[in-house]
Image (tube, rainbow, N blue to C red):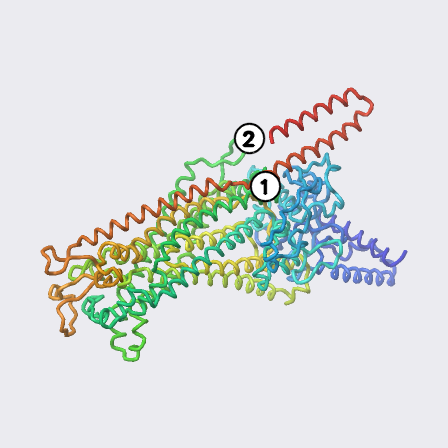
Amino acid sequence: MGDPDLLEMVEEELRSLDARSALQGGESMSSGETSFLIGEQTLPAKRFNLFLRRRLMFQRLEQSKDSVFFRDGVRQIDFVLSYVDDIKKDSDIKAERRKEFELNLRKTGLELEIEDKQDSEDGRTYFVKIHAPWEVLVTYAEVLGIKMPIKESDIPRPECTSLSYMLGPVKLPATVKYPHPEYFTAHFSRHRQELFLIEDEASFFPSSARNRIVYYILSRCPFGVEDGKKKFGIERLLTSNTYLSAYPLHDGQYWKPSESPNHVNERYILRQNWARFSYFYKEQPLDLIRNYYGEKIGIYFVFLGFYTEMLFIAAVVGLACFVYGLFSMEGNPTSTEICDPNIGGKIIMCPLCDEVCGYWRLNSTCSASKFSHLFDNESTVFFAIFMGIWVTLFLEFWKQRQARLEYEWDLVDFEEEQQQLQLRPEFEAMCKHRKLNTMTNEMEPYMPLCHRIPWYFVSGATVTLWMALVVSSMVSVIVYRLSVFATFASFMESETSLQHVKSFFTPQLATSLTGSCLNFIVIMILNFFYEKISAWITKMEIPRTYQEYESSLTLKMFLFQFVNYYSSCFYVAFFKGKLVGYPGKYTYMFSKWRSEECDPGGCLIELTTQLTIIMIGRQIFSNIHEAIYPLVFNWWRRRRARTNSEKLYSRWEQDHDLQIYGQLGLFYEYLETVIQFGFVTLFVASFPLAPLLALINNIVEIRVDAWKLTTQYRRPVAAKAHSIGVWQDILYGMAVLSVATNAFIVAFTSDIIPRLVYYYAYSKNSSEPLKGYVNNSLSVFLIADFPNHTVPSEKRDFTTCRYRDYRNPPDHENKYVHNMQFWHVLAAKMTFIIVMEHIVFLVKFLLAWMIPDVPKDVAERIKREKLMTVKILHDFELNKLKDNLRLNPDELNKQVMIEGNKVELVNSML
């Protein structure tokens, strides 16, 4: 017997011993259990036995560094479970659960191989490797309705257009973009295996399908009866810490390809062609992402990529509007008048706060008025209308992209994923009642509504309390702005070193910047704590399934974050400066602080500042957190191991030390994108650069998400999905709301409507219609009418001051009452809102009606594939029938006629 043959025999004997010891509770082999190799009669035999064991162990360790196979190097590892010896009082219970669970897994046909803790890096963790043999795969592929190829498709891929050739640098190689040919597919059937294109049983099912099948078995495998109830499922064992973790393996190390020619390391391909920041301009390998991570994660990256592509159009138009404002800034009539020493320099403005603040000249806001024109100009109206149409096109084209995706990824007849509808272990644990399920005719855990209503009240009250906390924190920031404005004003007036910056860094700007930064910090703090509380509240509601849990959490998180992120923007856009009163009769908050006023040019520039700080700050914080946190966490876990290098321990240990991509991983990604979508659409009239900032962020976000998913997280269990789910309804709701918010911003926050009213109704200069607008927009107040406790103490040689409003002068019989121009402007604002909303909604409905949900070519391809699939199945059954009925020609002709009628019926239905 040669040396390789001897080693092969030894390996086989060790495997059989491992299997026997695993059945006895997974205990490690003692040295005495290996005496079957060579008898212990002689010392040379003992030495040779020790030599063989050491050599075998060396080869085994060498093989297992990067191996995704069992020790035989043939059976692929589809899933890994890990656990540690528990010294607590319930350790025996957990050991018995594991023993029963693993025994039942073997009964289902799965094959297990256990790695002893002595072979792990930390010396305390056991690893249970799971392999699904062919018979298990074909059985459960049929149960799960997995579609597999039956014939290569004869439908050509979409042809490249001239535009496609122009975009050559952003294209990926065809072998990466389309890793596999397109096939006609059918639901797998183990009784018709000859129908499917099975070239190699080991690679027929992709790794994503294999881990999905194994997880399906794990989630339904029983592990005993406790308290008279049958307990099952890996999730319950993870919740009780019976097992530490359960995860599928990555294909290999992400920095090098697979050494085996029969095993393709798709993780490496994804890292090279997708999860690299230098490839930020490249398209995504969507089919490869779907093959590796499953449809649910794949569709998220399709959506993020499509959203980013559509943002490019909005970013270009927004940038054009910004450039228009930049070039027209110097020639703006309003800014020219404000900056003119003979106009703005002679207009004395009323104090912005009581006693401390002094009178000021209008031309001190020259720089601020020019800067305001960047975002408050004629293009603002155009961009607001454009974005109302853009959001409609985005959502309609996304429906088309989703329909195309359903066809390309075999999701046309998709049914809800079973693992989402599976009962949560927490629900089963809390239920003391059982009820007959009329669909399955089995008794299932049941919780009466009366037991859950108290928690619903607690949940609703908590969410309401936290939203009230957000509003109160916003009020606190407003109080801060009111209280420090006077401090900034007096300090900047007295500090001689700041005189040269007063022209652009005004007290209003200083208050706005510091207030916005403080508001952003409060937002992030509240958001951090609410995430923890909302998850706890949702668990206390005891949702029945994972789908119910995710839907309940989605509602809570979105409502809170909507209020948290947007409340300050709503305040500046629609409330600030609207109810301030007038000099001598200002309104006060808590009878102490005078209400905030807008700049003479309006509140739009402050809304822009608020939006910019919150949006950019949130995006930077999010990307840094997503990139740095898993990197530091994984470094620390590796540091705690015996060695510091990932090259020195096994494939399953490397993945075990990575971050967990939980069931809510995608939830937070969608939530982040939807909140950004709100910034881009709800307030975009005040900040046309918002789409450009979102575009830059998303380009980075795609690569950050790809990098962390490929290199820093365990491989998630593959799951199917045919859409983005409830997030699509939220996007539709925000799209409708955005039309109203942008119309109100243009009407009430910007200065466009008052200028247009003056232009067409009050201007007396035909050559320069806007000349005199500034003077017209400011009312006159008699300083003698100031109450004693509010009048500034400074000496003055003037008797009147100006303030922004449309009111009668002090010599009018109804002094300080709104004049007719105020009502004309108000009527014009309301008219504009109604007209803009009707125009945009009309265009939205027309576009939604004109653009079909399913593109015509996709509908035709679906019909063609259904027809071809039926024909292939018909030919297969017919040939099979011919073999079975070769001796009975009459029966054969009858069956041929029946099968032909079936095909004709399908053709008529299509």
Q: Position of residue 537 (x, y in %)?
A: 43, 48
Nearer to the camera, 107 or 110: 110
The residue beneath circle 1 is 857
Q: Position of residue 28 (x, y in %)?
A: 71, 54
The residue beneath circle 2 is 439
- Decide: few, some or many residues near mark 1? Use Cα within 10 Å; few <14, some 14-19, many ≥20: few
Question: On the rendered image, what quadrant is the N terminus found in?
Answer: bottom right
Q: Position of residue 486 (x, y in %)?
A: 25, 69
Q: Residue furthest bottom?
A: 497
Question: On the rendered image, what quadrant is the C terminus found in?
Answer: top right
As drawn, 94 above or below 41: above
Name the mark nearer the viewer: 1 or 2: 1
| Horizontal arrangement in the rendering, residue 843 relative to residue 490 (left or right) | right
**SS for dot 1:** helix
Q: Residue furthest right?
A: 1
| Horizontal arrangement in the rendering, residue 589 relative to residue 121 (left or right) | left
Q: Residue furthest top?
A: 890
- Decide: few, some or many residues near mark 2? Use Cα within 10 Å; few <14, some 14-19, many ≥20: few
Q: Position of residue 882 (x, y in %)?
A: 78, 27
**SS for dot 2:** loop
Residue 517 location, quadrant: bottom left
Amino acid type, mark 1: Asp
Nearer to the camera, 886 or 28: 886
Nearer to the camera, 338 or 241: 338
Q: Tell me if I can see residue 809 in this picture.
A: yes
Amino acid type, mark 2: Met
Q: Tell me if I can see residue 657 in this picture.
A: no
As drawn, 490 above or below 580: below
Residue under the point 22% across and 66% down? 353
Q: CA distance from mark 1 to mark 2?
A: 38 Å
